Amino acid sequence: MMGAEHNHAIPGVSKEKPLIAALLLTSTYLIVAVTGAFVTESLALLSEAAHMLTDAVAMAIALVAIRIGRRPADAKRTYGYYRFEILAATFNAILLFFIAGYIIYEAYKRFFLPSEVQSMGMLIIASLGLLINLTSMRLLTIGKDKSLNMKSAYLEVWSDMLGAVGVIIAAILIRLTGYSWFDSVIAIIIGLWVLPRAWVILKESMNILLEGVPEGVDLEKISQAILNIPGVTGMHDLHVWAITTGKPSLTAHIVVDLNSDCEQTLLAVRQLLAAEFKITHTTLQHERTADNNCEQH
């Protein structure tokens, strides 16, 4: 007989309004930054614009992912569309890798073919970008710990904020010293700064797609806690994975002592998993031995 908790809903606040506001701000600045990069001939500013482009794409995908993820489960997709959010986060991470690599390559070429950079224009545009990034970060802070997709969007805006600071520093240094190579140096630093952040998102999303044990979940600790419950004499086929961020699932075969009630023992297991490990979606098969099920009642 199966004991299970099958609530597929993911609790949380609405994430659409902050995303829409941040997307509008980012898209507006993107147009300004691209125009300014060509006018001032600043590669650092162009790298900032490229990162803003990934921000805009990430937020747009995040909005689509949230709306698709709300679709109810059906006969073909019994878990619903939650995985679309993880696919979106994976795409964002890969996009960041390509953008960072392109900027580093262009900065390297600029060392050998330097061009005059208009530092005052850089400074004004980057300062505007800094204000927009700080505003967007504040808008996205609420949902970043509840969704990998939101977290990827937040981290991209966060990295862009640091990028804007870098462009401001480059503009000031160029204006004080006249050395335009500061522009390429800052562009490379921004690119290298983004790469490990992209890797974190890619690693987390791939772990979910491969149905690996979620981050922060100790499988050995869970196993030991279950085996310590009175009436449990053994366990096998223990699996823990996540459908999407913040929604871990668990399945296991629990061997129950002959003198213990199967249903009460499984109830104790589910209560333990919910209270100590925050796992509420469980499917448990109880057995008297590893080969024979309990009598159903």
Image (spheres, helix red, strand yellow):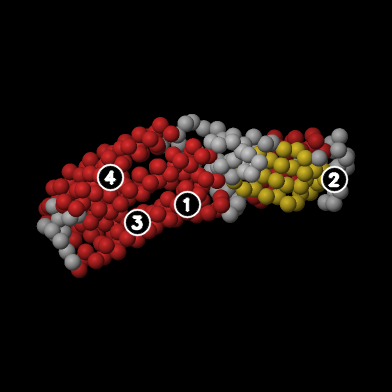
Could you tell me which quadrant the N terminus lies in? top right
Q: Mark 3: which amino acid?
A: Ile
Q: Earlier in the sequence, mark 1 or mark 2?
A: 1
Q: Earlier in the sequence, mark 1 or mark 4?
A: 4
Q: x, y percentage for residue 214?
A: 58, 48
Q: Earlier in the sequence, mark 3 or mark 1?
A: 1
Q: Are marks 1 and 2 in contact (CB under 8 Å)?
A: no
In the rendered image, the vertical position of residue 99 relative to residue 271, given as above or below: below
Q: Earlier in the sequence, mark 3 or mark 2?
A: 3
Q: Mark 2: which amino acid?
A: Asn
Q: Earlier in the sequence, mark 4 or mark 2?
A: 4
Q: Mark 4: which amino acid?
A: Leu
Residue at the image position 30 percent from the left and 54 percent from the top:
190
Residue 143: tell me if it is visible: yes
Q: Which residue is mark 4?
A: 30
Q: Secondary structure at mark 3?
A: helix
Is label 4 or label 2 in front? 4
Could you tell me which quadrant the C terminus lies in? top right
- Left or right, residue 46 beside residue 272: left
Q: Mark 1: which amino acid?
A: Thr
Q: Which residue is mark 1?
A: 90
Q: Which residue is mark 3?
A: 99
Q: x, y percentage for residue 258?
A: 88, 42
Q: Which residue is mark 2?
A: 293
Q: Secondary structure at mark 4?
A: helix
Is label 1 or label 2 in front? 1
Real-space CA distance between mark 1 and mark 2, rounded to the nearest whole angstrom: 41 Å
